[in-house]
Image (cartoon, rainbow, N blue to C red):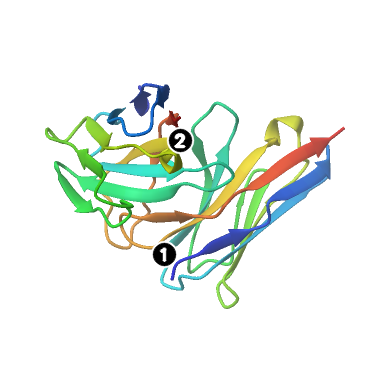
Amino acid sequence: GAGVSQTPSNKVTEKGKYVELRCDPISGHTALYWYRQSLGQGPEFLIYFQGTGAADDSGLPNDRFFAVRPEGSVSTLKIQRTERGDSAVYLCASSRLPLAGGRNEQFFGPGTRLTVL
Amino acid sequence: GEDVEQSLFLSVREGDSSVINCTYTDSSSTYLYWYKQEPGAGLQLLTYIFSNMDMKQDQRLTVLLNKKDKHLSLRIADTQTGDSAIYFCAEDSSASKIIFGSGTRLSIRP
């Protein structure tokens, strides 16, 4: 079946602009995650959705970052007033319902490379 | 706080074994993971180990876990050119969050 897809694959924007990044999870996966990967670093957790609600948004760096998942499937990561430091690859992952103490196998999309000029 | 550390680079000769090491800080992690990232491709789960295990073997891959020292390693036997990639060690700090290391870039010499 289809894996996690993300659009666009590349996004170039100017400092101060607003951007939206989209994630289509694997069908039937109730959990969805956003990560940010800066150059030379590992993915850094941003936010986790269980269904439509954000169950953990502790990784969002500041209030310029916001994410939604209105119907419990597709999610959009929104960044307001972009800054050059926001340049990174934004990764989305999905998984089946993670159980407490259970293995959380997250399937990752190819990412969106965001460049803020 | 939560932190996962690993060396940045490893170079091995084709056919030799590769050993990638990692240390982590969260002793409550239930599972520890190794992910592989190739250029232009997404992160791929390579293997994992339950925190109560010491070792797990899966074909050419061997994972060793020293829970006392919070040390995890990945051994790749008979390393091939297709194994060239960045390898990330990761731990689950909660049911939702996975903490990744900075990655080890594995390069293969002919």
Q: Residue at x 36, y 39 (%)?
A: A93
Residue A1 on image: x %, y %: 35, 22
Q: How many angstroms separate mark 1 from mark 2 (CA)?
A: 28 Å
Q: Residue at x 38, y 39 (%)?
A: A83
> A67 and B82: which one is in front?
A67
Q: Which of pointers 1 and 2 indicates the residue nearer the eye?
A: 2
Residue B73's quadrant in the figure? bottom right
User: Amino acid type of disc 1?
Assistant: Thr
Q: Residue B13 at x, y = what percent?
A: 85, 41
How far across and down, in percent of the image, does residue B65 sit? 59, 65
Closest to the observer, A74 or B29: A74
- Say if labels 1 and 2 share a chain: no
Q: Which residue is mark 1?
A: B30
Compared with A49, A23 (above or below) is above
Q: Quadrant of the N terminus of chain B?
A: bottom left
Mark 1 is surrounded, within 10 Å at the Cα level, by few (under 14), some (14 to 19) or many (20 or more) other residues, namely many
Q: Chain of mark 1?
A: B
Indicate left or right for A23 with B30 as reference: left
Q: Is residue A57 left or right of residue B69?
A: left
Find disc 2 in the rendering and name its residue: A89
